[in-house]
Structure formats: C-alpha cells, structure tokens
Amino acid sequence: MRREFGTLAGLLVLCVVLWFATPHFLTTANLLNVVEQSTLIGIIAVGMTFVILTAGIDLSVGSIVALSGVAMGTAFRAGLPVFAAALTGLAVGLACGLANGALITLGRLPPFIATLGMMSIARGGALMLSDGRPISGYPATFREMATGDVMGVPAPVLLMLAIYGVAHFVLTRTTLGRYTYAIGGNEEAAELSGIGVRAYKSAVYGIAGLLSAVTALLLVARLDSAQPIAGIMYELDAIAAVVIGGTSLLGGSGSVIGTLIGALIMGVLRNGLNLLGVSSYLQQVAIGGVIIVAVLMDMTLRRRARLPTE
Amino acid sequence: MASQPASPARESVAALRMEAIRKQFPGVLALDDVDLTVRAGEVHVILGENGAGKSTLMKILSGAHGKDAGRIFLDGREVEIDGPRRARELGVGIIYQELSLAPTLSAAENVFLGREPRRLPGLVDRSAMEEAARAILGGLGASFDVRRQVRHLSLAERQLVEIARALSLDARILVMDEPTSALTDREAQALFEAMRRLTSRGVAIIYISHRLQEIYDVGDRVTVLRDGRRIATLDVAAADRRELVRLMANREVDELVTRRPSALGAELLRVEGLCRADELRDVSFSLHEGEVLGFAGLLGSGRTAVARAIFGLDPIAEGQVMVRGRRRSIGSPRDAIRAGIGLVTEDRKRQGLVLSLSVRENISLPLLRSLSRYGIVDARAERELASRYATDLRIRTPSIEQVTLNLSGGNQQKVVLAKWLACQVDTLILDEPTRGIDVGAKQEIYALMERLTAEGLGIVLISSELPEIAGLCDRVLVMRAGAVVGTFDRGVSQEEILSAAVGVAS
Amino acid sequence: MSVKRVRWVAVFVAGLSWACNRGDGAGDAPSVALVLKTLNSPFFIELEAGARQAADSLGIELVVQAPDREIDVERQMQIIENLLQTGIDVLTLTPSGSREIVSAIAEANQAGVPVVIVDTRADAQALAEAEATIATFIGSDNVDGGRIAGRFVAEALGGQGRVAVVEGIPGHETGDSRLRGFREVIAEHPGISIVASQTANWERDQAFNVTQNMLQSHSDLQAIFAANDMMALGAVEAIAAAGRTGDVLVVGFDALDEARQAIREGRMAATIAQHPRDMGRLAIESAWSILQGDTVPAEQPVGIELVTE
C-alpha cells in the first residue's frame, strides 16, 4: 500500500553505495549539505506535486522564482522595509500562479500551454524589471533565513520540512487535498459530485506560484542577490523529483512524502557524483538515467497493482 | 438454417452465410447461436432493441471481435475473419455510425486513404486518384467536387464518401449501421437511391436501423434479433409493423422485474417546458415522493439530455425547474445537489467514480464539506459514514479503503448510489443503472429502489431495458427526437412502450 | 516488488562509481579542485586543458566540475560545498556570479582551503562585508578587451559610421564588461553611432537571426561587435547569407580557432584573444606555490590582445 517505501529504499541503497564509494559522504556536515542543497527544488516540488496530482503541469515555476525574487529586490531598492519587500515577492508569485489557474480554468487552455506562456512572460518580466542586472545587498536579518540555523540544523531545511509537513496534512486531511486527488483521478466525476473544480484547480496553481516565491526569497537570501536569470530549468528538476517520488503524471495518485524522497534522491545523486569527481558531462547522463529508471519501475509496479497507467 | 427462402424468384447462392454464431462477454451471452443469410443484391435489415446483439454480430463480421463459435461462408466458401484487414480483403465493407473520415482531407483522398495510387514511390498520382474517386462517387449519384475537403461536405455526402471508400476496396457486402440517424429525409432518400444502384449491381447490403418506416422503404428481407438470439427472418413485404414490434419486444419472463408501489407523497420536482437546441423540445413532467418515473426511448432520443439539464450540466434554453414547489435555477451540479438531486450517470467509470480513490473517499466526495471544519476533514465521521452506507447497501469489498477500480461493476454502482444516499438527496436520477452488471446485482438495485421509494425518495429511471421500465415504474414517459411522445401508467406493456419509441401507432 | 527498483538503482550507481572513482585513495598527492562556470564552451575547455597539463607535470590531483548551465551560481555553490567535504587542498574557481559566489568563498575560508579566482572577479565589496579572502586573482580584464575592440572598429571605420552590437545574456558580468569597454571607446568618436544592440544569449543560431533582422532594418550597417566569437560567427553567416561579406566588418571575442579561420579567409575582421590556456596553467601553478608556502601576487594579469590574422 505504501508506495513511498520503494522510493525510500532506493534512496537508502543510494546512500549505502555512496558510503562504500567515498569516505566523505556519510558525515554530518555532508548530509546537512545534501538536505540544504535539496531545499530549493524540494520546496518548488511541493507545489508541483499538487499541480501534477490534478493531472496538470506547471512549466513556469522557474521563471516565477526569478520574477518574485526580482520583484522583492525592486521593492527593497525602492525603499520598502525588507519584510514588506519579501511580502511583495510572495504576492507576485501567488498572482502569477493564480493567473496560470485562470488561464487553465476560465480560458480552458491546456496547462502545458498556459504555463509555457507564463514561463516566458515571467522571465521577460524579471529581465525588464531588473534591466537584466542582479539586484544585490540585503540586510543580515533577512539573509538569516538562508544562512541561519537552529541547533545546527540550517534554517532552509527547517523551512522546507515545515512546508512538507503542512502540505502532507493538507493532502491527507483536508477537503482541498481530497479534491486535488479527485480532480486528478477523474475531473468529470469530481464536477458531477458538486466540487467547484475551477476554483480548486486555480488554487492549486496559486500554491505552486506561492511556493516558487518562497523559493525565490530563499535564493535571494542565500545569494544576497535577486537574479533575473535565476531558476532556469528548475521546473524540470521539480517535475523529476515529483515523478521519481512516485506521483503519476496522469494525476490522482502520489504524495508529497514521495516527492521529498524524490528531491533527496536528486540531491544525493548530485552530491555523490561531485564527491566522486565524476565529469560534469556524465553527471547529466546519470541524472537522466535515474529519472527514466525510476519512472519505468513505477509504471511496472502500477501495472501489477492494476492501477491506471494510461 | 431456420428460415425458408422467402422470395424464390431472386434465389441464388447466398453472398453471406453466418451459422450458429456465438459470443460470450463477461456476464452476458451476447450472441446465442445466431444464423444469418444474406443474398447478393438484397438489402437485408437487422432489427432489434439496444443490446439485442446487432452490433456484436456486425463486429464479428468485420473482424473487430472474434467469435466463440460458429462459421462464416462467403459465396459458399468458408472463411476465417481474424481482423478488420482480413474482412476488407474478403470484400466486407462497414459504414459506421460515427464517421471515420479525416475532415481536412479531400473526398478523393479519403476514398483512397492509405492506398493512394502512386506514380513513383512516395509520390501520389493525384489526377488518377481524383479520376477514380469521381467514377465511384458518380456511380452512387454524388455530384459534389471530389477535391472538396470532407469537413465542408454535408453528412449525407460524407456517408457517400464512406460508401465509396468501401466500394473502392471491392466490397461485395456492405454493412450500414444506422446510416440515416443524422440525415434529413431528403438526404436519406438520396442515400436509398444510392443503395438501390448498388444492389442492382449485385452488392449485398446489411442495414441496421431503428426506424421501422425505412425498412419498408429499402428493405427486401428483415431479421429480428432479441437478447442475442435470432427470432425470425421475414420478407419485408409480408411483415406487418405490429408483428415486428412484437417480435422485438416479447421476451420470456425468466427474470421477474417488479417493484411494490409506494404511496405517493408531496411533489418533489416539476419540470415545465424544458427546451434545448436540437436535444429537448418542450419537456414537462413532475415527480412525487415515493414515485419511480421512467424515461423510455431509443438512444439519442433525449432521455440523457433531460437528466443533464436538470442536474445543471447543460444550460437550458427555455423552461423551468421547481423543487418542492419553489422555482430553482440550477446552473451546476453543485446547485442540483443543494436542491437535493443526485445523478447516477450511465457511464459510471468515466463520470460516476474516481477509480483511483477508495470506497470511503468516493462515498464522501459530494458531502466532504459538511464532514469538515475549517477545511479539515473529520476522519472518524467520514469513516463511520462510509462504513454505514457500505454495510447498508451491501457493497462487497474487503474494506472501505479498497480502491474502487478493483470492485465489480455492480459494487461500483452501489458505491455511486451510496454517495448520493449519504448526501440525503430526495430525488435520484438513475441513467441506465443496471448496464453492464450481473443479474444478482441488478436484483439488489431493484430491491433498493423499492426500499428507497418506500422511504419517500423520488426516482427518475432512464433505461433501455424495457422490462425495467415496464416493471418498476409508476409512470412512463416515452421520448423520441427530444420530445415526450407518450405517457403511460403502471401496467403498460413493453410493446406499447416500444411502439411509441420507434413511432408506430399501437 | 520494490526490491527490484532498489537493485536497479544500486547497479546503476555502483557502475558509475566504479567507472569514475578517480577522486579517492590517491595517497599523498595534493588535491586541487577547479570549478568552472560551464564545460560546454571552448573557452573553459581550453582553460581546463591548461590546468590539467600543469597539474600532470606538478603531480597534483585535479578535480574539475561545473554546473550544466553557465549562469547557475546556486548550483556552482553547491558543487563547492560538496567538494569541500572531500578535503581538497586548494579551490580554483571561475565564479558564475561575482557577488553571489562570496558566501561559498567564505565557506572555503572557514574550511581552511585557499581560494584562487580565475577569469571573473569576485566582488571586492561583498568579500569585505563577508570578511572573506582570496589568495589571488588570475585573469584578463574584459573591459579592457572591449576597449581594444572599440579602438579597432573606430580606426577601421575612420571615425565615421554606423555600428551594431550583439550582446550576451543580459545581466551576465563578462558580456557586460566587454560591452562597457566597447561603448566607452565608441562614445569618444562622435562620428560613430551604435544603431542597434540586441541580445543573442551567447548563441550562434540566435546571433544569425538577430543579425539578419539588423541587416533588414539598417541597410547601411558597417560594423558589428559581438560579445563572443560564437555569436560573431553567427553574424558572419547571416552577412554571407545576405551576400554582403566584406561590406560589414565583424569583431568577436575569445579568439576561437573557428574565428581565427574566418579572419584568415576574410569573412571576419578581428577577435580578442584572452589565452584561457595560460589562465588554467597559472591557476594550478599558483595553487602549487600556495601549498609550498610561497606567497603569490594578489593580481596576476593574463595578456589580452587583438587578433586580425
């Protein structure tokens, strides 16, 4: 029943192999590094999980990271207190997500097309707003968000875990979560059961946009710089994490726990390949291979469990 | 061979003989030793209710389905049809109800799709292709330009393109499945004219239709199927309409479909003058507590359109819906559910259930909000509710956590019913509630309907199963072409209903 | 059933680590990491080759890593964090972002690993704020290179004419510096005007399209400056396609072999040579000196020169 166990076992085996392969892998410092490095994609992947559970896709998350960050930078440079500037960034991310939702539900555009458009619009908007240049220099209090720690655990890791906790609760215990699964499993049946499908779908894209903005703030805090070219291809890493975590691209089944493990697998793999000194070229091949193998296995398992595969 | 040759004057070797064809589907014997003989140059009509086995028989002939037993002879020679390609090679052409043309290609291109005459490899000889298409279509009496895109042609013209495609494959046996269902009378006449030209050249046509009048217009002989059995084969000239209706409808009463009537209570639902372009014409009716109101009619007669309109799925052009005497505007399923109406759709897998969710999650879906506080679901209340209804309806499942995909058809249907009952609806619309489920589950659903009406629910039953309509309903409305054409009280016979549905005065 | 997936992943990773495990157990050889902006441009591949040659002759264990995308500072920082875990002795680095990289440099400092910066400077003010230090900077001045290109164009046009610019990715330090130097010089010549300036995102095929459009709207164009050679070559092809080879002179940057070839054939006018191979060699030699306890100069300029034949 618990499909996540398979993914978790994969992660553990990966860790064991790396433990044997290099003495530098299994150290507290390195493991904290890995988790911290997984936070950016990890947080975006939460929103992506919601979207994919409704059988949608969001290609615009990486660009929304850039636009939200730049929006925050611009607001801060214009004299707003850093806290208010951060809220501005969050609002912009949420607005972009809701715009995606409106295009998909009211405009009846396929999610692929709507978010592909938003991907370009947000990226262009970020470049326009920043005039193509990074916006740097933020107060240390804000940067604490990325650089601080609580009893040795980096703040971004705590933030990510909190987000996963909330998302897991929402998906398993709330109406929003149930409707997300129902819409992805059978949109027509959900509609016929009286669920306001449009509103919930829009909300899901709003969540994806908002979490992209959270990631943007984290990135700005870490780099001390809001970059209009930030987040390029994050959407693909996030989709990969979701899919490795066992969520079906056809919608209706999956979990954020799986996604967290998926994001960690990507993080551990990258970290391990760095530690082993594997060439950058081969790393790309390896990551692609892992994505394909994970999904192939997942589909095989589904077919055996008689769950819908197509 | 049971039937005597009915018109010896035109006797010859049968173009097609199907002998003792048998086909078993899970839970249903679709064809039970069916014989069919079709002569060259005749139009042979196959008549039967929905589910009588007409389509299955034709699918076996065209290679779309395999047969479990039986033999097929073409021109007296036994053949094995193991796929659509083989059927085509043997000269069997099929014109389907849903046209299968490529809309953006020209008529000529469609006629020769996949077999374009080539000048060089990969290079289509366009003029030769158009010439050939013109010759075939001209022979059918078509006068349009073969270079026009199919999407610009009328439905009747497209039918001719389909026929031309079959003929270009040297079809000697042509199956036409309700070809006139979307045509105007004038277009239908033109099609009949084309059919006559074909038969005069010795082509045998198997013609499937619901419209009794057409049988007399074009048919030479008619075979009646019922419940997967061949009932009779007659000369059209000798067949009386009422006789045909009786043959179609009359069945052995081997399963008793009855329901004890309940006392009728207050009016639940009143629909007045419901109109929707092409689909519904001035439909009015009312439903009371404790009543089962039946909607009979052929496929596409507007029964499902009524359900969709009341449930807020399709906007209505005119008319009003009153719930318990108060006028309500229902613009979405949500409004309908609030008004106390539930809909069990005809396609439960596509519309009724979220198959990837569990029994519990499906049952609670429409009323999850009322089981929640601040958006958080009360898991215990939900479990209790789902268990109660699963037990109450005797849903056979290892646990309420079972994914509904793994349930049988009958149990899936019970989950859909449970979902609405849990919502405390007082009006239930059932659209083909027993389709594709086994006899035992059917009986359970009939019993449930009896119990629910006794408890005061009102039920609208849409069904193509005449015994259900005749046996369960307090009143029956018969629809044809979007309008109510007949109203009957309890005790009406199946023949009366069928006569009204196909348009024959009884 | 999950056992099967597990087995797959295990086999996959085990195979990889077997194939590529070069980093560990090499004994006493000092280990130096070279973290580049990318490994998919000829400039950095040359730089790596120079570094590898020096490392081999000095007996240094060299680990080279780079993000998939040149602009991905975040990923570059992660690579540095990961490599610091493996106990490298010196970090040599071409920063993907001048300011952003500073916190990674600070981490290296904390780990006691000296940092050698190559090609792109780390922001001095940010370094000061973070109290981070670098051992040395090796590189040539992109602004200066832009100036050299500007002077060449001004001279070739005789102080009169209309010029277009093909930019790299907006907001990208290297490209911005080159353009800044170029514009600075052109501004000193009132007879020369920059009539168009468009980005082609460092890419050859985009430069082809951008140049085509520019030739359409400015038929009297006399010179094009592209912020790297890949884009310059795209411009050369667009000019050839318009049948105007020789009318419009093209100046690029980086002195790629293919650009030198185009210059010899008269299709392109000039390019700026930066000697990445020397940078790579110097970086490793500096690392060696630091490990020996020798002092290295804070700045080690690498020559930059105009190539016209």
Image (spheres, coloured by chain):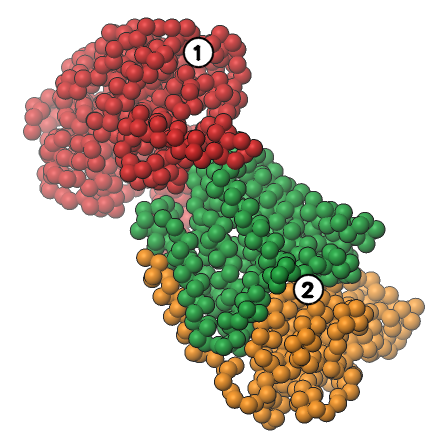
Chain colours: A green, B red, C orange
**Within 10 angstroms of label 2, few (less than 14), some, or many (20 or more) residues?**
some
Residue C78, x across and y down, in percent: 61, 68
Q: Quadrant of residue C126?
A: bottom right
Q: Residue at x 41, y 6 (%)?
A: B266
**Within 10 angstroms of label 1, few (less than 14), some, or many (20 or more) residues?**
many
Residue B6, x across and y down, in percent: 11, 21
Q: Residue at x 56, y 48 (%)?
A: A47
Q: Nearer the viewer, residue B500 or B311?
A: B311
Check the residue under mark 1 and report the chain it is in.
Answer: B
In terms of secondary structure, where does tag 1 sit? strand
For residue C134, side relative to residue B292 (left or right): right
Q: Residue at x 52, y 89 (%)?
A: C27
Q: Nearer the viewer, residue A264 or B205?
A: A264
In terms of secondary structure, where does tag 2 sit? loop
Quadrant of image for the N terminus of chain B = top left
Q: Where residue B110 is drawn, which disc sits there? A: none
Q: Nearer the viewer, residue B225 or B26?
A: B26
Alpha carbon separation for disc pair 2 and 1: 66 Å
For residue A127, side relative to residue B266 (left or right): right
Q: Which residue is mark 1?
A: B269
For residue B494, side relative to residue C72 (left or right): left
Q: Residue at x 63, y 41 (%)?
A: A98
Q: Quadrant of residue C31?
A: bottom right
Q: Quadrant of residue B183?
A: top left
For residue A48, side relative to residue B141 (left or right): right
Say whether mark 1 and mark 2 are on the same chain. no
Q: Which residue is mark 2?
A: C201
Vertical order, B164 against B464 (above or below): below
Taking the view exactly as shown, the residue that stands out farthest to the bottom is C57
- Nearer to us of marks 2 and 1 is 1
Q: Disc 2 marks which amino acid? A: Asn
